[in-house]
Image (cartoon, grey):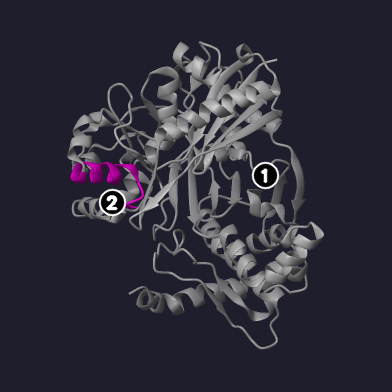
Amino acid sequence: MKYILAHDIGTSGNKATLFTEHGKMVGSHVSSYDTNYFNSTWVEQDADDWWNAVCISSKKLISTVKIDPNDIAVVSFSGQMMGCLCVDKQGKPLRKSIIWADQRAQKQAAQIAEHISQRDFYHIVGHRNTASYGIQKLMWVRDNEPEIYEQTYKTLNAKDYIVYKLTGNFYTEYSDGNSNGCFDLVNLKWSDRIIEYAGIDPEKLPDLKPSTFVAGTVTKEAADATGLAIGIPVVLGGGDGVTANVGAGSIAPGKTYCCMGTSAWITTTSDKPIFDEDMRTVTWAHIIPGLYAPNGTMQSAGGAYNWAKNTLCKMEIYDAKQHGKSPYEYMNALIEQSPVGANGVTFLPYLLGERAPRWNADARGAFIGLKSENQLGDMLRSVLEGVTMNLSIILDILRKQVNIDEILVIGGGAKGPVWRQIMADIYNANIVVPTLLEEAGSMGAAITGGVGVGLFKDFQIIDQFLEINSVHTPNPEAVSAYQPIKEIFDDCYFALEKVFTKMAR
């Protein structure tokens, strides 16, 4: 029996997952690490914490499952994107990594904007020019820590650093390259134009390769640290948002998934980038060569529902604790008593500002339409409906170029059947629920690794990995009822847009 080891290097920790060559998950282990938040918008992590977590989780998983490390056919990765880790020629980190959530590089984004319009940038990279991406963060290092910039040999994302630690080689691949903000999406290469405007030495960027590229093999030093066998092939894998495409079965045009976590996104697959006239969505380079992953991500989805639980449902939390249940069971029971449209209550889910489709950092959350007869269940239902209607705007943008009638859902928010039915009715699409809701990234990394070393012929092997648990079909009456409510939701946002700006001053 051959095994595939997938590492998912996230924001809170690394999850090591072991799959058989036949697609069965046989074990996983999570090793956590810290994130440093400071100076209001600065967010950093120690790259050695990533490496230690990979070492710990690899050893723990191998010993728990009790396999021979020589039976591992390949190691591959899914990793957090849009970071900036500066390393020297020996691969030593010169400072902590500036991770995806960091927003310090506003001035540097503005410097790029002096030379290239937002629309031109969007049509090169598939993304807006913002402080979130790697090139702007590297510019910040150049402008504020020149001695670090001068010593920088390469700038890496999380998984690329671990690939170096395992193999001694510096690479990135197209999806993570895309997250650097200086990537030519159509031609799959670094954009000379943007790099020139950014004033960055292009030699500091790693070589670009396909996600299935074998970056090297596990060295003796790495084997001693991780418990892996010397010589195991290491495949690059991809950025976490895109490996999830593969793990969710989104491997052909129109195949679509929705991840409903603390934040949420809808991503489809297309054979060309989708450029929205209003630049509300983005497009990533897909793991599969020749394909793209158009996407829209919102800030607060499951996070909004969790906020509602902690703020409005003290009694439900107490009752759940007394009876050994989840408070969401009590909340979902209340929601089922509220009709489509939540008895006239509309919720704007912008508790953390908003990315897609609003791109408005000043946006705020709001309950609108409250009446004296409204109950707690109406407010809770409006939260689920508000999140889903915001995502449906993203879906409608994607549907202009891709036919979408079925959506696979993953993430913690996909656990509740009430919310899944609301999705089916608002999206007017079949909602497909896999048995494993939290493994799309790891599964996608494993399949990418398997294809990379020839263990699998192609990505269609996902059909062997994915086990479907249930399907929710849209209720025609609810679909019709939601159409005017979706218009009201949009109207509420635009009516308050200028108010939000005033409130943010």
Identify which residue is drawn at 31% across, 52% down.
Answer: 129
Identify which residue is drawn at 68% across, 25% down.
Answer: 64
Assign a secondary structure to mark 1.
loop
Viewer-closest of 330 and 129: 330
> How crowded is the residue under tag 2: few (<14 C-alpha within 10 Å), some, or many (20+)?
many
Q: Which residue is mark 1?
A: 437
- The quadrant where residue 74 appears: top right
> How crowded is the residue under tag 1: few (<14 C-alpha within 10 Å), some, or many (20+)?
some
- Give residue 382's position: percent from left, percent from top: 63, 71
Amino acid on which disc 1 is placed: Leu
Mark 1 to mark 2 CA distance (whole Å)? 34 Å
Q: Is residue 187 left or right of residue 114?
A: right
- Magenta residues span 128-144
- Give residue 373's position: percent from left, percent from top: 70, 87
Assign a secondary structure to mark 2.
loop
Q: Which residue is mark 2?
A: 105
In what quadrant of the picture does the N terminus appear?
top right
Q: Is residue 288 visible?
A: no
Of circles 1 and 2, the one toward us is 2
Q: Is residue 188 left or right of residue 322?
A: left
Query: Hey, which residue is sitting farthest right in the picture?
Result: 323
- The quadrant where residue 379 appears: bottom right
- Give residue 460's position: percent from left, percent from top: 63, 30
